[in-house]
């Protein structure tokens, strides 16, 4: 590794760890938690590729587990999140070589995103939730309604569709993140099934899918401006 790559790897490993511990929603059935770490995982993989994406995602996420007391997940997280970062970084760079895929995907991806957000949000993420941070600086209780998810789904689908038509490669990046996210969801389901059984493990599946959706939206929002800044330097 060159010195610049080492420095970037260190910075983005810390970013993944901080993003993961910053906001958490505890899930009692699996003793796990919902977090925003996928935003940093996807951003790192898109910006820096599979090698840095794998290291920063795996190590940063595992450190977050250790810091917040979820050490039982740390070994699995190292592998699962590392693989997730690698897949997103590798697949996104591979798909860039096939720009002809962008046009058909620019129609399909927004529809898929709308369905994912609406379905997961209205079924599993409506009601009263408690949001906390680590360290425990704050704790907030808030109400989420179904119409909020439908609105968010429509806005996200429109934004991704618009960006795909103009930037061209956005839909390819979304497919890469969905692929990496699918591996993450499956990986944690298998690990938690071994620990607690399939039924409790299944409870966390929609939460992990929610993390993927949040990661896609946040990762895309940050990737475009940061990639432009990187190209200018």
Image: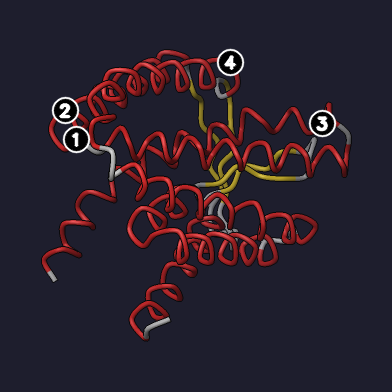
The tag earlier along the polypeptide, 1 or 3, is 1
Q: Extreme bottom residue here?
A: 3
**SS of the residue at dot 2?**
helix
The quadrant where residue 4 appears: bottom left
Cα–Cα gap, marks 4 and 3: 17 Å
Dot 1 and dot 3 residues touching (CB under 8 Å):
no
Q: Is residue 196 above or below residue 19?
A: above
Q: Are marks 1 and 2 in contact (CB under 8 Å)?
A: yes
Q: Which mark is residue 200?
A: 3
Split into 4 quadrants, where in the image is the N terminus?
bottom left
- Please tell me how crowded label 3 is: few (under 14), some (14-19), or many (20+) other residues with Cα within 10 Å: some
Q: Position of residue 197 (x, y in %)?
A: 88, 34
Q: Which mark is residue 181?
A: none
> Where in the figure is residue 46, as x and y percent of width and height?
36, 53
Q: Label 1 to label 4, Cα distance in Å?
A: 32 Å
- Residue at left offset 59%, top offset 53%: 83
Tag 3 or tag 2, which sits nearer the N-term? 2
Residue corresponding to mark 1? 168
Residue at position x 43%, y 54% from top? 40
> Mark 4 vs mark 3: which is more N-terminal?
4
Circle 2: is it few (<14), some (14-19), or many (20+) Cα within 10 Å?
Answer: some
Q: Quadrant of residue 117?
A: top left
Residue 119 in the image: state x and y as whole percent. 51, 15
- The residue singled out by tag 4 in the image is 123
Residue corresponding to mark 2: 165
In this view, the residue in front, 128 or 176, is 176
Q: Can you say which quadrant of the picture contains the C terminus? A: bottom left
Badge 1 local density, few (<14 within 10 Å), some, or many (20+)? many
């Amino acid at each position: 590794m060159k010195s610049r790559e080492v420095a970037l790897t260190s910075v983005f490993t810390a970013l993944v760890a901080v993003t993961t511990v910053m906001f958490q929603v505890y899930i009692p059935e699996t003793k796990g938690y919902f977090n925003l770490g996928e935003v940093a995982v996807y951003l790192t993989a898109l910006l820096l590729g599979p090698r840095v994406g794998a290291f920063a995602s795996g190590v940063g996420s595992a450190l977050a587990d250790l810091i917040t007391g979820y050490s039982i997940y740390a070994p699995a997280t190292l592998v699962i999140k590392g693989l997730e970062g690698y897949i997103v970084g590798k697949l996104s760079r591979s798909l860039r070589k096939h720009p002809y895929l962008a046009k058909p995907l620019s129609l399909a991806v927004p529809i898929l995103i709308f369905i994912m957000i609406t379905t997961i949000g209205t079924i599993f993420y409506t009601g009263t939730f408690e949001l906390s941070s680590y360290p425990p600086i704050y704790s907030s209780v808030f109400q989420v309604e179904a119409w909020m998810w439908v609105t968010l789904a429509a806005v996200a689908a429109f934004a991704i569709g618009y960006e795909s038509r103009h930037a061209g490669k956005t839909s390819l990046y979304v497919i890469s993140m969905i692929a990496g996210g699918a591996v993450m969801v499956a990986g944690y389901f298998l690990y938690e099934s071994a620990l607690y059984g399939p039924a409790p493990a299944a409870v966390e599946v929609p939460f992990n899918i929610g993390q993927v959706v949040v990661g896609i939206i946040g990762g895309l929002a940050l990737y475009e401006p940061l990639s432009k800044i990187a190209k200018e330097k």
